[in-house]
Amino acid sequence: MSVLPLSVEKVIEEFGRLPGVGPKSAARMAYHFLRSSRKDASRLAKVLLEMEEKVVDCTMCFNVSDSEVCAICSSPLRDSSKICIVEDPLDVVAFENAGVFKGVYFVLGGLISPADGIGADELRFKELKARINAVLKDHEAIEIIIATNPNLEGEATSNYITDMISSMEVGEKVKVSRLAMGLPTGADLEYADQLTLKRSFEGRNIL
Amino acid sequence: MSVLPLSVEKVIEEFGRLPGVGPKSAARMAYHFLRSSRKDASRLAKVLLEMEEKVVDCTMCFNVSDSEVCAICSSPLRDSSKICIVEDPLDVVAFENAGVFKGVYFVLGGLISPADGIGADELRFKELKARINAVLKDHEAIEIIIATNPNLEGEATSNYITDMISSMEVGEKVKVSRLAMGLPTGADLEYADQLTLKRSFEGRNIL
């Protein structure tokens, strides 16, 4: 006999699909709606349906957007000759919050990961190629900043992108860079892993 | 300028209201629906609305239920002369999973917590009193097992219940017990906090 009503079990099951949510947290979330305010459940349901209905991929950068071309791609204040390639929309949020980049983005939709069965075909490399060619029509020189995560999948994806750009024979017109790797702010050298330390050393800046 | 579409921000806000969900996790949850399967969002919306519509409080024990009297209270296999008093429905789930108790429950709906502004009036003490009186009509002797959490709020609530039962002048007919406190299975005595050790010592069992 299931202790909780079936309708509650179903909510727990759906919450359990969310990233980083185990069965116990999922139960606590479902119960939250039963305890405090049952209206919270319909409010969450409403915004979920609204999001599903309204959100589209920007046709230029593939970031989530509520219009065909997103606010960043359509802004005259952004430098469209600089394209920062990221894995997903949350990376765009991170960059925007840091306020360090005034170019545009390109959202790949994932990283190459043989372990998870994600090959190059699943990602937006064809669209990236088309995007680079389109930008090259408007600009003499462009910069591609590869901002994939500093892990195996991020490396593989970065390599794939550099190979792809090499094969495009765009020569000097496209400068490709990648985010620096090294010690994060506030890190303790003593506790840094070997690879981080190695990269931090190799990438040392002459003062 | 907000980076994410408003409809996504709204979903993040609602997820952020859930217990144990910070802004970053909320964003990752919202994004989960945009990435893998956008249909997951409407499925969650559907089950949330269904839960809101179908779930009621059991009129006997106040546990969540899909019928007026829950499956436990209406089961002829349960001993209605033993009432286990718990804070919330998830505690019932924990007990049922342990399979140790064959009586019935009473869900208080919270614990007395002056710090959070939760007084006795907010909880189901009146309903508990009525329930005990109703059960006393059917049974010569009953047992009340207080199963509130072993913390300040749980103590205060437990004391309130024992005082309430004393004032009911039910004499020998109602036996009141409380869950044992002590070292949890697999604990390391060396790392146990002082209060746990103290209670474990005071409650030691003669062999």
Image (tube, coloured by chain):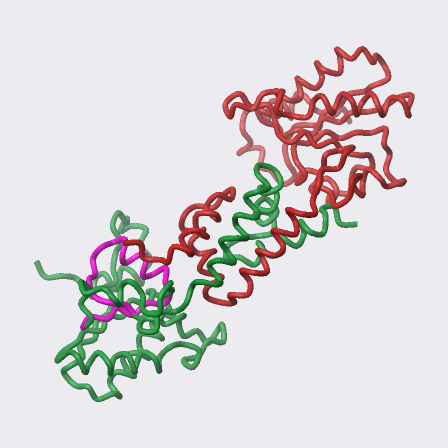
Chain colours: A green, B red
Residue A12: in sight, yes or no? no
Image position, residue B25 (x, y; %)? 44, 51
Most extreme residue toward the left, as rendered? A207
| Residue in the picture at 56% in, 24% down | B118
Left or right of B128 in this view: A169? left
The residue range painted magenta reads A81-105
Task: Please say if B181 is above or below A17.
Answer: above
| Residue in the picture at 82% in, 20% down | B133
Left or right of A75 in this view: B72? right
Task: Please say if B7 is above or below B82.
Answer: below
Task: Please say if A121 is above or below B121.
Answer: below
Q: Is residue A5 magenta?
A: no
Image position, residue A20 (x, y; %)? 50, 54
| Residue in the picture at 33% in, 79% down | A160
| Residue in the picture at 69% in, 44% down | B55
- Quadrant containing the N terminus of chain B in the rendered view: bottom left
Q: Quadrant of residue A76?
A: bottom left
Residue A19: in sight, yes or no? yes
Image position, residue B124 (x, y; %)? 68, 26
- Which residue is nearer to you in this view: B132 or B204? B132
Image position, residue A62 (x, y; %)? 36, 70
- Which residue is nearer to you in this view: A59 or A164? A59
